[in-house]
Amino acid sequence: MSKVLTDSFGRNVTYLRLSLTDRCDLRCFYCMAEQMVFLPKKDLLSLEELGHVADAFIARGVRKIRLTGGEPLVRKGFLTLVEHLSRHLNAGLLDEITLTTNATQLHRFAGRLRDLGVKRINVSLDSLDPLAFNRITRGGNLTRVLEGIDAGLSAGLKLKINTVVLKNDNADDIPNMVTWAHERGMDMTLIEVMPMGDTGEDRFDQFIPVSEIRNNLEKKWALHETAETTGGPARYVNIAETGGRLGFISPLSKNFCAGCNRVRVTCTGKLYMCLGHGAHVDLRGALRVGGAETLDSALNQAMINKPEKHDFEIKKSGNKSGTTRHMSATGG
Ligand code: SAM
Ligand code: SF4
C-alpha cells in the first residue's frame, strides 16, 4: 500500500464521506431551497466510478466510508456500490461501511444493508410531531420515517438519531426526542445549524447554540461527560435517567477541527478537504483522463490543501458567511 493520507498539519485521513447524489425526496428548510435545482444526471459519477474513487482512498489507508447525499437511498442501484465496498470489508481492508439517511426508504433496504455488513446507520430526524416534521422537511411524511426506523431496528442495525436544533421548530421538544430515542436503544446527536448554501431562509432565525439546549437538559437530567470521541466533532454525555448517550456538535460555538480525520467527495467527484471551505480537487477529471495513477496523485495534492479549520459564523444580518454550497451538494 502506498503512503497513508496525511495533511500538512499532521492529521491522518482515515474516513471518507462519499456522496451518491445531490437529490433528495425531502426539502429540509435549513438544507435545501424549496425550488432546488439539481445537477444534470450526466455530471454524476457512475456507481462504478464511485467504486474506483473508494478503492483509491482505501488503498491509501481510509478505513471507514460513510455513504451520504442528498439522500443516498434514492440513488438508483446504490446497493451495487455497497456490494463492492462489502468485498473490502470482508477482505479486512475496511473497518466500516455506514450511511446517513432520512430513513424514508429504509424499510426497503434495511435487511439487505445488514446482510452486506452495514452495522450502524445515522438517521436524520428533526421532529416527532407530524406537522412540525412536515413543515421542516417541506412536505415529508413522519410515518414513513418511523416505519423506516422500525425496519432498521428490526433488522438489527444500530441506529443513531441526528437532530439539527432549530430555535423555533424543535428546541422545546428535544427532551421528548431524547427520551424517545433512548427508550429504543438509539443514541442521539444534536447538531447546530451551519451556514451552508442559500435555502431562502434566514439562518439567524433558525440558529440556537447546542450549549443552550444542554443547559436546559441539565435542569432535568444528570449528564455525565464521557471521554469518548469518534475522531469526529461530537462531544458525548451519558444520561443517567434515560440510560442513553447524547452527542453535541457545535461547529459554530466550539471549533472541532484539530482532530479532523475526514474528507468528503461529492457525487460529481469533487474532493472537499473541509466542509467549511471551497477548495477542492477534481477527482472525476483525474479518473476519466488519467486513471488510477492520476487519481492517486490528486489525493496527494488534496492533502497539501486541507485547511487547518473551518471559519463558519452566523451573523445577526443572517446568511452571509459560510459556504455557498448546500450540505446536500457536499455530502453531510
Ligand atoms: N439526506 C440524508 C439525511 O438527511 O440524513 C443525508 C444527507 S444530509 C445533507 C446529512 C446531514 O446534514 C443531515 O443530518 C442534515 O440534518 C444535515 N444538514 C443539512 N444541512 C445542514 C445545515 N445547514 N446545518 C447543519 N446540518 C445540516
Ligand atoms: Fe434531504 Fe437530508 Fe437535506 Fe433533508 S437534510 S433535504 S433529508 S439531504
Image (tube, rainbow, N blue to C red):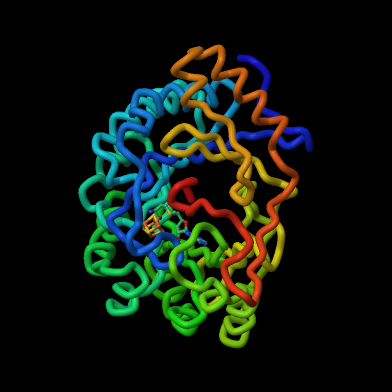
**In the image, residue 200 above or below residue 308:** below
- The answer to which image quadrant residue 221 occupies is bottom right
- The answer to which image quadrant residue 303 occupies is top right
Res. 277 visible in picture: yes
**At which x and y percent is residue 92?**
49, 24
Q: Nearer the viewer, residue 279 or 224?
A: 279
**At which x and y percent is residue 55?**
48, 22
**In the image, residue 302 above or below residue 238:** above
Quadrant containing the N terminus in the rendered view:
top right
Q: Quadrant of ligand 1?
A: bottom left
Q: In this view, does 97 lie to the left or right of 308?
A: left
Q: Is residue 4 left or right of residue 44?
A: right
**At which x and y percent is residue 289?**
47, 15
Q: Nearer the viewer, residue 56 or 173?
A: 56
Q: Which of 252 and 97 is in front in this view?
A: 252
Which residue is found at the position 48% from the left and 53% from the top?
A: 327
Which residue is found at the position 72% from the left and 30% from the top?
A: 304
Q: Is residue 279 left or right of residue 48?
A: right
- The answer to which image quadrant residue 15 occupies is top right
Which residue is found at the position 25% from the left and 44% from the top?
A: 111
Task: Find the residue positioned furthest to the right.
Answer: 9
Res. 246 visible in picture: no
Report the label total: 0
Task: Find the residue positioned furthest to the bottom.
Answer: 219
**At which x and y percent is residue 195?**
57, 62
